[in-house]
C-alpha cells in the first residue's frame, strides 16, 4: 500500500512540474488516501496481536 502511495506521489510531482494541475491534484489526493489507509492498517497490525495474547 505504501508503494502505491509513493507511486501516486511521484505521478503528482511529475504532473505538477509539467503543468497538468488537474492530474497532479487527483494523484496527490489518491496518494494521501493510500498513505492514510497504510497507516491505519499498520497500526491495526501492531495492536491486534497484543490483544490476542501474542508478543
Image (tube, grey):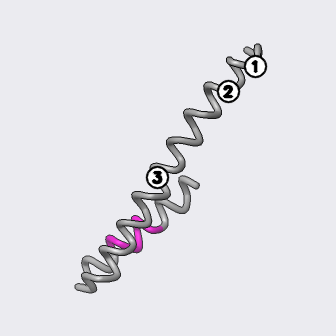
Query: In percent of the image, x 29 and y 83: which residue is there?
Result: 22
The relative height of residue 22 versus residue 43 in the rendered view (above or below) is: below
Q: Please identify, in this view, whether the residue under mark 3 or under mark 2 is nearer the observer.
A: 2
- Mark 3 neighbour class, 10 Å CA radius: few under 14, some 14 to 19, many 20 or more: some
Mark number displayed over residue 52: 1
The relative height of residue 15 versus residue 33 in the rendered view (above or below) is: below
- The residue range painted magenta reads 8-13
Query: In percent of the image, x 54 and y 48: which residue is there?
Result: 38
Residue 23 lies left or right of residue 1; in this view the side is left
Residue 2 lies left or right of residue 15; in this view the side is right
Mark number displayed over residue 48: 2
Which of the 4 quarters of the picture holds residue 46?
top right
Q: Main secondary structure of the magenta part?
A: helix
Which of the 4 quarters of the picture holds residue 11?
bottom left
Which of the 4 quarters of the picture holds residue 27?
bottom left
User: Residue most toward the front?
Assistant: 51
Q: Residue 8 in the image: x percent, y percent? A: 45, 68
Query: In percent of the image, x 44 and y 58: which residue is there?
Result: 33
Amino acid at each position: 500500500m505504501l508503494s502505491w502511495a509513493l507511486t501516486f506521489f511521484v505521478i503528482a510531482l511529475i504532473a505538477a512540474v509539467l503543468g497538468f494541475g488537474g492530474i497532479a491534484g487527483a494523484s496527490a489526493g489518491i496518494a494521501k488516501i493510500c498513505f492514510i489507509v497504510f497507516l491505519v492498517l499498520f497500526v491495526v497490525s501492531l495492536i491486534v496481536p497484543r490483544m490476542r495474547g501474542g508478543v
